[in-house]
Amino acid sequence: EPEVTQTPSHQVTQMGQEVILRCVPISNHLYFYWYRQILGQKVEFLVSFYNNEISEKSEIFDDQFSVERPDGSNFTLKIRSTKLEDSAMYFCASSVTIQPGLGTDTQYFGPGTRLTVL
Amino acid sequence: QKEVEQDPGPLSVPEGAIVSLNCTYSNSAFQYFMWYRQYSRKGPELLMYTYSSGNKEDGRFTAQVDKSSKYISLFIRDSQPSDSATYLCAPNTGNQFYFGTGTSLTVIP
């Protein structure tokens, strides 16, 4: 069964450093998402991406964050200058469409990348 | 007001019990109501979803939505130890999902 994959599974970085989190969405999916989950807290939406541009973003997704689909398979989240509060599990998700009623708007999640900022 | 409210639990039940998990939401534009299950250190996986109000059954799981009261429920019949996980409700309009905090469930053999 196709699945979303993410690398690395755990990333440790120093405050102020740049990190890139990588995701490989399911191959026929067109919509891509990043979420984060701070330990013990709820899953929070960061950004959605379609047709090589951002569709929606939350207040959390400020200028420190950027997303990119550098090739036909990868989808990346970059944090330019990490802060302690960026420590969280970051989940990538993908879906075929967002059209209501077709069932194809279901988002499938990857296993996550645990980011630890020291 | 939070978009989605969910009792975080933890909830502990004996094997075979009926489990009721609930969420409330505030946005009347939500049309899709997903339930995700999240095992420790794993990403959320879709359990089932319903569209608009009503019930949907899938094996031991039943999802209910009451849009008039903005109340979402997931029932698990004959609960099994393998059901032990965190259950997340995620109402949405399509593009952006709003997750509840999740309810931690432990089914004791």
Image (cartoon, rainbow, N blue to C red):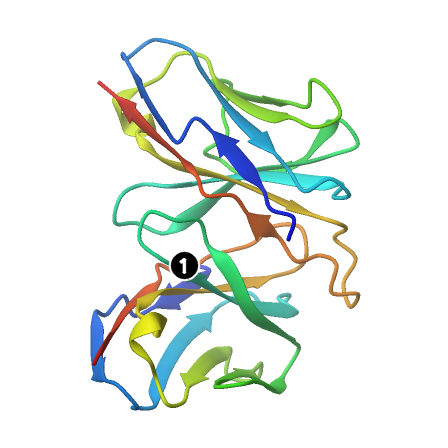
Badge 1 density bin: few <14, some 14–19, many ≥20, Cα 10 Å: few
Image quadrant in which you'd find residue B73:
bottom left
Q: Is residue B78 above or below residue A74?
A: below
Residue A101 in the image: state x and y as whole percent. Answer: 78, 68
Identify residue for label 1.
B2
Mark 1 lies on a secondary structure that is loop
Total labels drawn? 1
In this view, the residue in front, A22 or A32, is: A22
User: Which quadrant would residue B53 be assigned to in this image?
Assistant: bottom right
Q: Amino acid at mark 1?
A: Lys
Q: Residue at x 39, y 77 (%)?
A: B22
Quarter in which the C terminus of chain A is drawn: top left
Furthest residue to the top? A17
Disc 1 is attached to a residue of which chain?
Answer: B
Q: Identify whether B101 is placed above or below A34.
A: below
Coordinates of residue A29 in the picture (x, y in percent):
74, 44
Q: Quadrant of residue A71?
A: top right
Q: Which of the pair A103/A71 is nearer the observer?
A: A71
From the top left corner, tell me how far across and down residue A38 is, in percent.
31, 41
Q: Is residue B53 above or below residue A10?
A: below
- Asked if one can make out residue B28 in the rendered structure from this viewpoint, the answer is no
In the image: residue B2, left or right of residue B90: left
Residue at (74, 53) in percent of width and height: A98
Residue drawn at (55%, 37%), measured in percent from left and top? A5
The answer to whether residue B47 shows anywhere in this view is yes
